Every structure is written in structure tokens, then in C-alpha cells.
Image (spheres, helix red, strand yellow):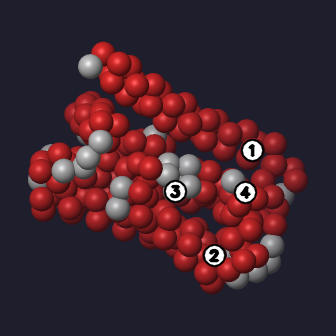
Amino acid sequence: MSDDVSAWLDALGPIAFYLVVWGLVFVGTALFVGVFLPFLTGDSLLFGAGLVAGSTTSVNIWVLTTGIAIAAIAGDQVGYLLGRRYGRPYLTGRRGRWVQNGIARTERFYDLFGWWSVVVGRYVPWGRVFVPAVAGVSDMAYWRFVTANVVGAFTWGVLITLMGYFAASIPAVRPVAYGIAGVVILASVVAGIRAWRQDRAASADD
């Protein structure tokens, strides 16, 4: 993934690179793109972008992370407001068995963890996509959602990007950064595969 992100920089230049990364983070939750492209809009994208920033002087890590935080917050806000505005029909209108199963899992996740589901959900592919809309449908208090959204955006978006940056730019912390990022990304991949297998099992039962 980092090689792909680096190729974007070579082809697009730094300004367009920022916009592509920020745009993917935003549409991943705001437009449900993360349902279909979880690895292109999730942890791997952030870590790869951080690696690129640590490997070149043309990308400023603080500009990159600030934009990622804003895009992550804005994407979840759009998902929340759409869910709150259009209610349950907004979720049931999402087609596909995998999508509907993801929504059902997210609703159980939200019922169990409440405020924390918005923060923790950032690290789970289906949670990252559906938790904001489910919170809106469930009438979670707006400012309560905003606080969870901000905390989640920074602990997920900024920290993972910084880990990629430090892994590329500071040799002494490289093993630790790679190790932490590897655990986070692996956990996201495992969660995505587990959701896919559960969906396949449900389809077989039908």
C-alpha cells in the first residue's frame, strides 16, 4: 500500500496528494465508500501516507495529519447527520446482504459501547463506516457524538499516520512503529475477514 501511495505523490504532486488522501478518508465514511474499499480508505492508507511524508520533504506531516483529522471528523459528521435526518429508512436503503449484516453488527456494537463505539469503531472496517449513521438514527446527542468523533479522529487518523511517518524518518523507533501499526492493521484485516465469513455463512444458511 505504501508503494501505491508513493506512486500517487510522483504522479500528482504534493497538493493533489494531500487532496486524494483527505478525500479518501472523507468518502470512506461520508459516502459509504469504505464498505467496498476498506483498505483503500482505512489504516493502510494512513500508514502509507505517513511513510511517504517521512521519506520526502515535499509532504509536510503536520499539514497531512491536520487535513486527515478534519476529513475524518467531517466524514463522520456527514454520516451522523444523514442518519439523524433520514432515520431508519436511510440505513435500510443500503442494498446488499453484506451491508445489511454490517449495519446489524454495528447496531449491536453501538448498543453495547455507546459513546465509545464511535471511538473504537474507527479501528474496525464496518464500524468505521456504519457507526456514525447508526448513532444518528439512534438519536445520540449531537455534542456527545462530536466529542467522540474528535477523539476517534485523532486517535485513529493522526496516530496511525504519525506511526508511518516515524517508521520512515527515525530509524531508532522504526521497529516499534512498524510493530504497533502492524497490530492495528492486522486487527482491522481480521475484523473485515471475519465479517465476510459470517456473511458467507449466513448466505449458506439461507
Q: How many marks?
A: 4
- Dot 1 falls on a residue whose secondary structure is helix
- Image side of residue 133 versus residue 65, left or right: left
- Find the residue positioned furthest to the top: 205
Q: Determine which residue is flagged by label 2.
A: 17
Q: CA distance from mark 1 to mark 2?
A: 23 Å
Asked if residue 70 is positioned above or below residue 92 in the image, the reply reads below
- Dot 4 falls on a residue whose secondary structure is helix
Q: Which mark is residue 151?
A: none
Whichever of callouts 2 and 3 sits on the residue coming sooner in the sequence is 2
Q: Nearer the viewer, mark 3 or mark 1?
A: 3
Q: Which mark is residue 2?
A: 4
Closer to the camera, 99 or 47? 99
On the image, the x and y values in percent for residue 116 come to: 34, 41
Three-letter code for the amino acid on which mark 3 is drawn = Thr
Q: Nearer the viewer, mark 1 or mark 4?
A: 4
- Dot 3 falls on a residue whose secondary structure is loop
Q: Residue at x 21, y 63 (%)?
A: 81
Q: Residue at x 30, y 36 (%)?
A: 97
Q: CA distance from mark 2 to mark 3?
A: 14 Å
Q: Determine which residue is flagged by label 1.
A: 178
